[in-house]
Image (cartoon, rainbow, N blue to C red):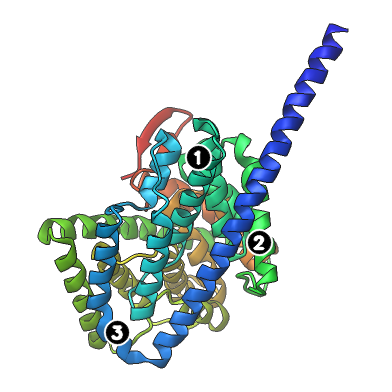
Amino acid sequence: MNIIKAKWKEARIFSRTFLKWLWISALIGLVGGVIGCVFYKSIAFVTDLRAASPWLIWLLPVGGLVIAALYQFTHTKGESTNDIIDSILLGNKVDILLLPVIFLSTVLTHLLGGSAGREGAALQIGGSLGYNTGRLLKLDEKEERIAILSGMSAVFSALFGTPVTATVFALEVCSVGILHYSGLVPCGVAALSAYYVTTLFRIAPTHFVISPLAVEPLMVIRVALLAILCAVLSVVFCEVMHASNHLAEKAVKNDYLRAFLGGCVIIGLTFLVGSREYNGGGTDIIARAIYEGRAHPAAFLLKMLFTAVTLSAGFKGGEIVPTFFIGSTFGCVLGPFLGIPPEFAACVGLVGTFCGAVNCPLASVILSVELFGSDCIIYFSIVCFICYMLSGYSGLYSEQKIIYSKLKAEYINIKTD
């Protein structure tokens, strides 16, 4: 009888907790989905507007001043994705003002031709939404952290149309080596709710139709060699991003002057290169590499340079879409030298470089399925495993924690380089 009572009590606790997170995460997902869809539409609109009005790039230095003023005025100066990670790991506060500020700043960056992505904004918007929803509902500190993860999953899912990747990425990105399974239901419900909202807005998920490649020993070796090169590329990209931030802050201490000069440098680089392919996110270049197998030989290096200057100057967005650009064009260029079709090599480069840069192998494998289908999951799994290990302890997010060693079963708990 006592056993039955204990089991009944346990069942009630689990059911109550399940139902609690069901409605909280659904609420976060629906709100995050709406915000994410509006954000997606805004980025698409200003990208088209910039393409139709090339003269807008001349306003980039002024846009930098506006962004610096926004952060100064709202007292959110210096807040970034790293602060969201800190909030999850340490329980730090996330200002609600970060939501509109990062939204407007990212849209302005894309409008005027800065080289940036949109997922950094997604994680910050989602993190701010989740944290402040938790505060509003008077959740305890540990529940607030799950609410933050749910918000991150929701907006990431809305922007990319990859709900399963969004769920696992949010759980995996903060503490590499462990997954807090208590967040699976909240993050999953939030991501799926946000994804449902995208269907109402008629936003198509990010997906590429590719020709499957038969699994053959020689091709496995070739893909593995490309994965090793992608791991090296991800380390180089992370180091360039960190070094450029430190250098810019040290060389020009005034935020306004740094943003203004950064805008001027981007303008100069754009006209020096003679192409606008490296302004904005560059999703059309990613699609061209994957579908047509074409990319400029130096495209990945130029995108790295444009992105480093843009973000170190204080413009906003994120590094993941640029990582997709860099990885896909890199793979497209080098694939034929290794005997890999350039279109497939572009896909390998995208997934592998992303995995090495964010240290999220499970999310990266799932991403490959949601983006390219499951036919080549063996190849993509091999790529992700290799890139995860060989990228060492580098990472795009300096507050990301590596909990367990990549080399042996050992607790290390260090931050990424």
From the top left corner, tell me how far across and down residue 101 is, in percent.
Answer: 37, 61
The quarter of the picture where the N terminus appears is: top right
Secondary structure under the numbered disc 2 in the rendered image: helix
Secondary structure under the numbered disc 3 in the rendered image: helix
The quarter of the picture where the C terminus appears is: top left
Between the C-alphas of marks 1 and 3, the distance is: 40 Å
> Tag 1: residue type?
Arg
- Left or right: residue 244 compared with residue 87: left
Question: In the rendered image, which residue does mark 3 sit on?
Answer: 57
Between the C-alphas of marks 2 and 3, the distance is: 33 Å
Characterize the local packing of mark 3: few (<14), some (14-19) or many (20 or more) Cα atoms within 10 angstroms: many
Residue drawn at point x = 55 percent, y = 58 percent: 155
Corner quadrant of residue 403: top left
Residue drawn at point x = 69 percent, y = 69 percent: 199
| Residue 135 badge | 1
| Residue 262 badge | none
- Left or right: residue 267 compared with residue 193: left
- Left or right: residue 237 compared with residue 221: left
- Left or right: residue 252 compared with residue 141: left
Residue drawn at point x = 35 percent, y = 85 percent: 276
Q: Earlier in the sequence, mark 2 or mark 3?
A: 3
Whether residue 397 is visible, yes or no, is: yes
Please name whichever residue, 321 or 361, is drawn nearer the observer in this view of the structure. 321
From the top left corner, tell me how far across and down residue 348 is, in percent.
Answer: 53, 65
Whether residue 164 is visible, yes or no, is: no
> Tag 2: residue type?
Tyr
Question: In the rendered image, which residue does mark 2 sit on?
Answer: 195
From the top left corner, tell me how far across and down residue 230 is, in percent.
Answer: 43, 60
Q: Earlier in the sequence, mark 1 or mark 2?
A: 1
Characterize the local packing of mark 1: few (<14), some (14-19) or many (20 or more) Cα atoms within 10 angstroms: some
Corner quadrant of residue 228: bottom left
Please name whichever residue, 120 or 91, is drawn nearer the observer in this view of the structure. 91
